[in-house]
Image (spheres, rainbow, N blue to C red):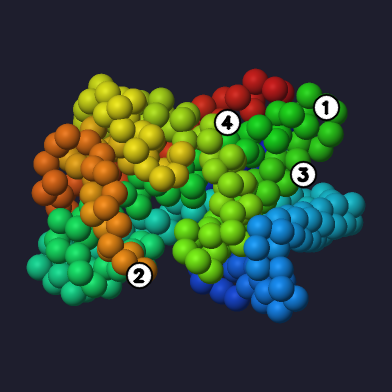
Amino acid sequence: MLELTGILFFAFVIDLFIGDPVYRLHPVRIVGNGISIVEKVLRKFGWSGREGGVILVLVLEIASLSVYLAVSLALHRVYLPLGLCFDLYICYSLLALGDLFRHIKPVIRSLKAGNLPEARKTVGMVLGRDAHYLDENGVSRGAVETLAENFVDGFLSPVFWYVAGGVLAFLLGLSPIIAALSFVLVFKIANTLDSMVGYKNPEYLYFGWAGARLDDILNFIPARLSLGILFAGAWISRLHPLDGIRVALRDRMKHDSPNAAHAESFVAGALHIRLNGPIRYPDGLKNKPWLGDGSPDVGPMHIRRTALLVRCSAWIAMVVSVSILLLMV
């Protein structure tokens, strides 16, 4: 279990302070290319409904797990330290917190410099909405919402499934590291599927259903655990944790997703702001309900406070996770 704990901790530190370089053979990029290829094949043969979406999920999950297990087990057998380095690389590649902060910093700089076009451009790189029509408040709200939602999607959920897989394997007498990373990989594939095909438009409403539902299931527990972790993070960050919990308990189910509004509504309450509201996506305007009862005027200061909250909460989650794993030693 010491190796299991070390891999998670060092993957977290490397991701936080170095981030992910952009390169063709990044594991998530390989999965994304695989999704595109399999989707084209399925649509070519007329499998463009829910059946095709289920096949897409099964093919990607089975193929990705098979490749990971084959490579990891082979390296472990050849030379244990080499296998552990490969596992560390995979774990590090499947966390996405450091790059989130790096994408948000240019948004803050552009807003402080009064360069709204550049702020729209930079925030558009991490939003799934049309940033061309956003004013300063809209850009700032988008950045805050991205930080809150991706705290769960990009960090807390992978960490949760890593710990769950490792503990379960330990209790069953299996390899904790292999199981932990297999669990994380299953989650990351579902999350990537949701981001690529989980749209509610005529093209993907049925085809993307399986991937989107699997992502909802795997994010269900982490999204709810995020409230306790964010509460502790808000207390350390000197925000308003009680207001965060109050708003979250009231507004957490207002989003179409059963999970996305949990962290967003907590952040809205903790910062005394309002998030969501009418949002323009590439396929049109969507009137989302407001989260929170504070001011709709959001600026760079609120983005910085949210980033601090997320960073503190990530360290809290890591300390809790490492403590759980060390208790199994």
CA–CA distance in space, label 1 to label 2:
48 Å
Please state, as top left, top right, bottom left or bottom right, where the N terminus lies in the image.
Answer: top right
Residue pictured at 43% horizontal, 54% vertical: 98
Q: How dense is the environment of label 1, judged by Cα within 10 Å: few (below 14), some, or many (20 and up)?
A: few
Indicate the amino acid at tag 1. Answer: Leu
Q: Which residue is mark 3?
A: 178
Give the CA distance from mark 1 to mark 4.
Answer: 20 Å
Image location of residue 146, percent across then percent down: 35, 52
- Residue 51, given in percent of the width and then of the height, sits at 71, 59
- Residue reaching furthest to the right: 77
**Pointer 3 local density, CA inside 10 Å: few below 14, some 14–19, many at least 20:** some
Where is residue 231 shown, x and y percent of the image?
34, 27
Residue found at x 22% / y 36%: 292
Asked if residue 172 lies left or right of residue 39, the reply is right
Pick whichever of labels 3 and 2 is earlier in the sequence. 3
6 sits left or right of 303 in the view: right
Residue kind at label 2, given as amino acid type: Pro
Cα–Cα gap, marks 4 and 3: 17 Å
Judging by the rendered image, the residue that carries numbered circle 2 is: 282
Q: Residue at x 14, y 46 (%)?
A: 296
- Closer-to-camera residue (163/329): 163
Q: Nearer the viewer, mark 1 or mark 2?
A: 2
Amino acid on which disc 3 is placed: Ile
